[in-house]
Image (cartoon, helix red, strand yellow):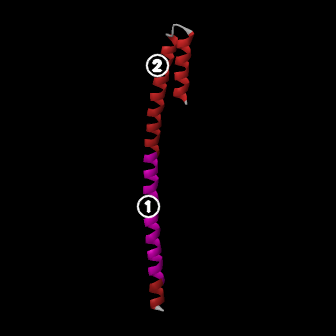
Amino acid sequence: MSEMTTNIVNFFKEFATSLDKNKDKLKQTEINFQVALANCGDHHDDITQNQEDQLSAKVVEMERAIHHVMLNEKLKDCFDLLD
């Protein structure tokens, strides 16, 4: 009977240890995910800001266009940038 009790206790001990390790892995995975998500957000913000700056520069060029042919070219550049 003692051997069976020891085996049961060892089983639950190993089971609890395994649960603790998995819990730690889950916490680390969550931290890694949050870091990756923040990096992705920062990268997206940089890309968006760059595109907004380029579009603003194109709008200024459109405002300074002296005739409709030049204006159409600048407008096409703006649409190409948005695509």
Label 1, residues with CA under 10 Å away: few <14, some 14-19, many ≥20:
few
Q: How many marks?
A: 2
Which residue is at the front of the view, 81 or 21?
81
User: What residue lies at 46% left-to-right and 81% top-to-bottom?
Assistant: 9
Q: Position of residue 31 (x, y in %)?
A: 43, 51
Q: Position of residue 71 (x, y in %)?
A: 54, 13
Front residue of 27 and 51: 51
Checking the image for residue 25, the label placed there is 1
Q: Earlier in the sequence, mark 1 or mark 2?
A: 1
- The alpha-carbon separation of the residues under discs 1 and 2 comes to 48 Å
Secondary element under disc 2, as helix, strand or loop, is helix
Q: Which residue is rendered at x = 43% and y = 61% of the image?
A: 24
Give the answer, above or below, for where 27 lies relative to 52. below
Please report contact status of discs 1 and 2: CB closer than 8 Å, yes or no.
Answer: no
Report x, y in % for residue 65: 51, 10
Could you say whether the residue bearing mark 1 is in a helix, strand or loop? helix
Q: Quadrant of residue 79?
A: top right
Q: Label 2 sits on what residue type?
A: Ala
Q: Residue at x 42, y 56 (%)?
A: 28
Residue at point 46%, 53% (across, down): 30
Q: Main secondary structure of the magenta part?
A: helix
* Residue 11 is inside the magenta segment: yes
User: Which quarter of the rendering shows the C terminus?
Assistant: top right
Label 2 sits on residue: 57
In front here: 38 or 20?
38
Q: Is residue 64 within the magenta segment?
A: no
- The disc placed on residue 17 is none
Read off the magenta span.
8-36
Which amino acid type is shown beneath numbered disc 1?
A: Lys
Residue 33, image x, y percentages: 46, 50
